[in-house]
Image (cartoon, coloured by chain):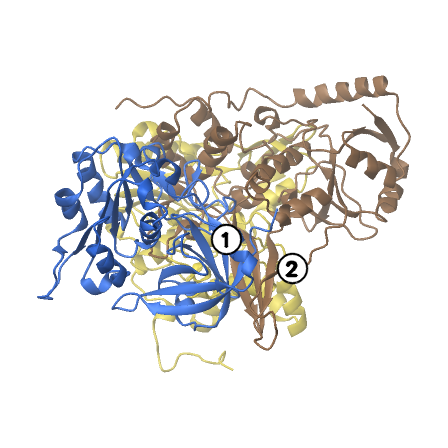
Chain colours: A yellow, B blue, C brown
Amino acid sequence: MDSLTDKIRTLCTGLLKDGKVDMIVGFKKGTIPMSSCPCVARTPEQAKELIWDSNCTLNLANYLTNRKEKIGVVAKGCDSRNIVNHIIENKVTRENLYIIGVPCDGMVDKRKIRALFNDDITLFSEENNKLFVETASEKKELDKQDFLKNNCTTCIHRNPVIYDELAADPVEEQKIENRFADVIKIENMSSDDKWNYFNDLIKDCIRCYACRNACPLCYCPTCFVDESNPQWVGKGQDINDVRTFHLLRAYHCAGRCTDCGACEEACPMDIHVRAFTRKLVKDSCEIFDWEPGLDPNKRPALDTFNPDDPDGFIK
Amino acid sequence: MKNPYMPYPVRIDDIQIATEDRSLKTFKFVFLNKEDEEKFSYHAGQFAELSIPGKGEIPIGIASSPTEKGFVKFTVFKTGVVTSYLHDMKAGDIMGIRGPLGNWYPWEMLEKGKNIVIIGGGFAFTTLRSSIIYMLDPANRSKFGNIDVIYGSRSPGMLLYQNELFEWEKRDDINMNITVDGTDDPDWKYNVGFVPTIVEEKAPKADPDTYAIICGPPIMIKFTQPVLEKLGYRDDQIIMSLENRMKCGIGMCGRCNIGKELVCRDGPVFTLEQLNMTPKEY
Amino acid sequence: MKVIKIDKQNWTGGIDKSRENYQIFGPVKDKEHFVFKKLNLKEYPDMENALSVLSPKSILFPQSEKILAASLDESQDDHHIMKRVATDYSPRAVIGIMPCDAKAVQLVKLNFDTDDYRDPYWCDAYEATTFVGLAVNKPSIYDFTLSMGSGPFAEEGLDVLLVDCKDHFLAKVLSEKGDAFLKASGFTSEADADKSAKLINEIKNQAEKAIDAEKVKTEKLKEKSLLELHGASFWEDLSFSCINCGTCTFVCPTCWCFDIQDETKGKKAVRFRNWDSCMSPLFTLHASSHNPRAEKVQRVRQRFMHKLKYFVDKYDQGTMCVGCGRCVVHCPVNIDIREICNTMNSYEAEQA
């Protein structure tokens, strides 16, 4: 991982020195163990703060829109797919970006790791797929593979799909046996069980909208929940309003969601919000044979129409 | 202490269309309980929350004067959910008024014989109307020196309180300068020109005892400020009324602050001198 | 100072006894995290000082609260006349609240209980509540309460301070309310005042040692120029990573801003107040579509200026942050108030 950090710093310093970009969007070290902070580097000096490790979980495509600068961006597989989405949706242009691709072997789930300990984690480091975690009273060595974020365990696009330069050799893509096992489990529930499952899922939602705001797809100038004239959705904690938010947001991501997991990562209440979007990832894959964010020259599934499009889902 | 969120119940007594484009209407309210009128004792420059159950509340400057008894008046621009609904209500309908809220023009100081220059533009003439009626009241007029008014709107039909403006024009104890940005009415006998221009031409020069009260759209205020400076007005002689998004009106909900001041409770009236000490977040 | 000794084997029995006179609120584990809520019979507060995701502010200030209601049915005499919604303000006790969260309640009180206006919903709930705090023997690594005028054993805002002494609690009685609660729980066995004060002090010193009070500095905030801090260039970079969610404001024990919303159902109108967040552009959006804080950098600046400068200047009672560390833990993009506080505290105006 350290060699990746070094490589990213060298590349970015060069890009800034040569004036190839005005700024770099990357990650710097967080102020608490197992964290990272999206950051901007405008000078070679600032580029020395860039890092790469298994906590660089958020999606940096979120920081590229509505800017005039020529931007260098550090992008793992899912970030690169969201950059493709942005290009298709005219939020950024390819010419305005210099993409430093980072082949990714998965990000770690800090919640799974925290759950192993009784007290606060004070130190986190990693080497060769081993994680070293310390608290005031304990020390553990863990296999990274066992503590990946859920979306990383089913990821089949670990290598950036679009880049100007790679920071490392490509990694081997995962062969996933049953990629949507989690969705199928819910599909097989009875209507009542599904209803209860989703109600229980969102019962702690505080409507902070961290899931929406961490999502690179959610760039609407005014989100439907913020419409105030007329107001579309109630603002309180009524379960109907909370449910409306989650369902509509998920549908707005249909055929666009890359399952980067930023929504779940950002949620302070540990809500498994991907339970909504995963179903739509599965459907767009199975019904339309469509994986979003792979090719900037292809129109998305919900953007095109063919008379012989499958319509079995219309009931 | 009473519940500050509880509106006084009122009945809409009368609704008048205030401008030719019908975007403004003047509502006259009568309190359902006589004693509430006493409790709603206010000063010119204050505002209140018009409160429609099930729709919401909007902060609006009080257009009637404390010297007018038996009713309160508000002139409302149709823009959002609540104001649109209000524009469709009828005389006789019941709703609520919460207030009076905020501070007021510094009457205690001004009533010591100060000369007053009222500068208004567009819809923002409501609390200025309240102030003029208040000052012209026979019981109060002698407390003030000269009263000059410069009020402008886009066109003659967009002037608020037209009948009153033309009445005041005829009086000799108030110096009216009515203006419009433009008009094709050949019978228009008042000024044509933007408010800052007319201020430059007609407003009295600064004097230690002269105070300007300004209400208007941001663009008008932006161009009037340098004119007043040129005329020699000090920052503490320029009095303004601010607007910000508000909900509670009592300084608790947190959104209307400019720095540490809350527009709803520490304002809406500030001198330019005070505003120079705050971030420009309005 | 009266100190009561509570054997842990009598603890749940005492809680149960207190339920005859009090509604009991406290932290409990729900799914993976801790929440403060009203406890049902047979539910007992967790007494391990776990940092709840949301602060206990909701006990006095629910995220969504009905404040007024009216009938819209014109056949009713009182149609369209709003009335206060009935709420249960019978005595309640919050057990296991951290000292810093109790201090936060005192800071929020400055907003809701003023000379001009009294917010009856918050104030009535406050008056009904007895705050039974639990001293923090082992502060978390995120705890910076000592820098913010509080501390793991601070007593401000508490009616009782419980100190965990392994097989028993020592309960410092800090007010009449606290005394009444302990009596109602049957906890009446007085401990030797001197001995227990000494023991509590030992544990306290141990706990305070675990916090580096020098890490976060606030002493210069007051003397800084408000306008210079507001105009500082550091806000641009500090706010870059912010995604403008409301997490920091919602988890914060002192963030008190709210929205008022009306809803109707059939012929019934209800007025609510909901937590609101200065991170949202809608918070300050004018009906004219003008927005004085339209940009992210302005909203981020507002939050920290409010807590660390406007509040400091306005009330002269320290910062509007008690150092609980919740926003530090939960900010999805690691914006760290401790660093921002130090940046503000050490800021020297840039040369023009």
Quarter location, residue A33: top right
The correct choice, above or below, for B6 with respect to A64 in the image is: below
For the point 51% across and 23% down, the residue is: C218
Q: Answer with left or right where residue A123 lies relative to residue B20.
A: right
User: Percent from the top left, x then y, of residue C283?
Assistant: 44, 50
Q: Check disc 2 and report its element: helix, strand or loop.
A: loop
Q: Can the viewer see residue A263?
A: no
Q: Can the viewer see residue A307?
A: yes
**Which residue occupies the foreground of this view, B219 or C131?**
B219
Q: Nearer the viewer, mark 1 or mark 2?
A: 1
Q: CA distance from mark 1 to mark 2?
A: 23 Å
Q: Which residue is mark 1?
A: B40
Q: Which mark, residue A78?
A: none
The correct choice, above or below, for C119 with respect to B237 in the image is: below
Number of residues whose C-alpha sits closer than 10 Å to that of mark 1, classed few (under 14), some (14–19) or many (20 or more)? some
The correct choice, above or below, for C156 with respect to A223 in the image is: above
Of all chains, the one bearing label 2 is C
For the point 65% across and 23% down, the residue is: C210
**Which residue occupies the foreground of this view, C286 or C221?**
C286
Give, as a three-letter code, the residue at label 1: Phe
Does mark 2 fall on the same chain as mark 1?
no
**Which residue occupies the foreground of this view, B138 or B72?**
B138
User: Percent from the top left, x then y, of residue C84?
Assistant: 63, 58
Q: Check disc 1 and report its element: helix, strand or loop.
A: loop
Of all chains, the one bearing label 1 is B
**Which residue occupies the foreground of this view, C351 or B119?**
B119
User: Percent from the top left, x then y, of residue A231?
Assistant: 45, 64
For the point 61% across and 30% down, the residue is: C143
Q: Which residue is mark 2?
A: C85
Give, as a three-letter code, the residue at label 2: Val
Say whether marks 1 and 2 touch (CB < 8 Å). Answer: no
